[in-house]
Image: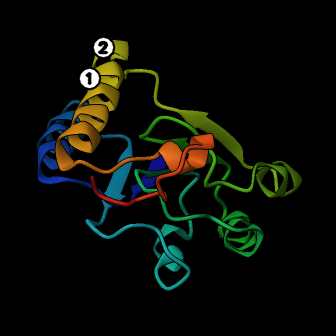
Amino acid sequence: MKAYLFGVTPVEEAFLKEWQDQHPDDEISYTHSPLTADNLELAKGFEAVSTQQAEPLTASDLKLLAAGGVKHLALRKVGADNIDLEAAAKYGITVANVPAYSPRAIAENGLTGAMYLCASGVTTTGRCGGETSPGQRN
């Protein structure tokens, strides 16, 4: 297997090196940069791409990835709302999420966001039909 990873963090880098040592027949290359139209040519000749980003991958991005030989796109994040899934199917790219995310970690992240909103004093009653404007501080 040949895979190219975009947006690799220092923590992931250590695991990638360990995995590569255990699987010398597979080729893994990576960059710390997210996948963009400017660097997607790095994946040319690789059958799989993995990314962890919120930036969208458009139909034109996916067309170029497919033209370069990419057949699989593994997302190291929850959700695929930033991927043009119809275009991926059209160009023969299978899209998958990495299944190793903890439901507890996701819940903690949501709770942390809610606590931040409460602590910052931002009200959202305007969105719910109240008199206060969205984003207005108490």
Q: Judge whether 68 appears above or below 113 on screen.
A: below
Residue at image x 58%, y 48%?
127
- Residue 113 on image: x %, y %: 29, 38
Q: Which residue is mark 1?
A: 108
Count of numbered labels shown in the rendering: 2
Residue 49 appearing in the image: no
| Horizontal and vertical percent position of residue 57 | 62, 64
Picture quadrant where residue 72 is located: top right
In this rendering, would 57 be left or right of 34? right
Q: Position of residue 110 (x, y in %)?
A: 34, 30
Please name whichever residue, 83 or 25, is drawn nearer the observer in this view of the structure: 83
Q: Amino acid at mark 1?
A: Glu
Q: Residue furthest front?
A: 131
Q: Are marks 2 and 1 in contact (CB under 8 Å)?
A: yes
Task: Give the SS element for disc 1.
Answer: helix
Instruction: Let me know if residue 130 appears in the view.
Output: yes
Residue at horizontal 46 percent and vertical 30 percent from the top: 98
Label ID, residue 104: 2
**98 over 25 or under it: above or below:** above
Q: Nearer the viewer, residue 133 or 20?
A: 133
Tell me, for residue 138, which label it has, or none: none
Q: Residues within 10 Å of mark 1 (few under 14, many from 20)?
A: few
